[in-house]
Amino acid sequence: QPGTLEDVTLKVPTIRGAIHCKLQNSADSWAMELSIPGNSEAELLLPERFTKIFINSKQARRSKMVSFGNGKRKMIVLKSGTYQISCR
């Protein structure tokens, strides 16, 4: 949840290697580069307001609505690899 932050860079160490994330946040869109270490998978939770989600330039078709805090999020499971994600 980046809130009002416009640019976010994260590195999260795990036992399988670091998760890297770079996010550009605006009022109506996100652009994200996400790297997930080998032999891992990640659950990506995106705000419900995004109706168009693209992963590596292809529209994401599988998302599951999940409860998160006081609202709902779209969840997409990603396997290890590097992803370019855009949402609007």
Image (cartoon, helix red, strand yellow):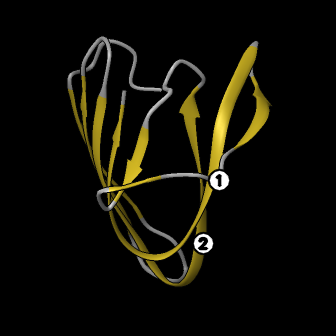
Whichever of callouts 1 and 2 sits on the residue coming sooner in the sequence is 2
Check the image and report above or below for 86 versus 28.
below
Check the image and report above or below for 62 versus 83.
above
Residue lying furthest bottom:
39
Q: Which mark is residue 39?
A: none
Left or right, residue 51 beside residue 4? right
Disc 2: which residue? 41
Check the image and report above or below for 48 versus 65.
above
x, y percent for residue 59: 43, 51
Left or right, residue 69 beside residue 88? right
x, y percent for residue 26: 25, 18
Residue lying furthest right:
67
Which quadrant of the figure has residue 57? Answer: bottom left
Q: Which mark is residue 62?
A: 1
* Mark 1 in CB contact with mark 2 (< 8 angstroms): no
Left or right, residue 34 beside residue 49? left
The secondary structure type at the circle numbered 1 is: loop
The secondary structure type at the circle numbered 2 is: strand
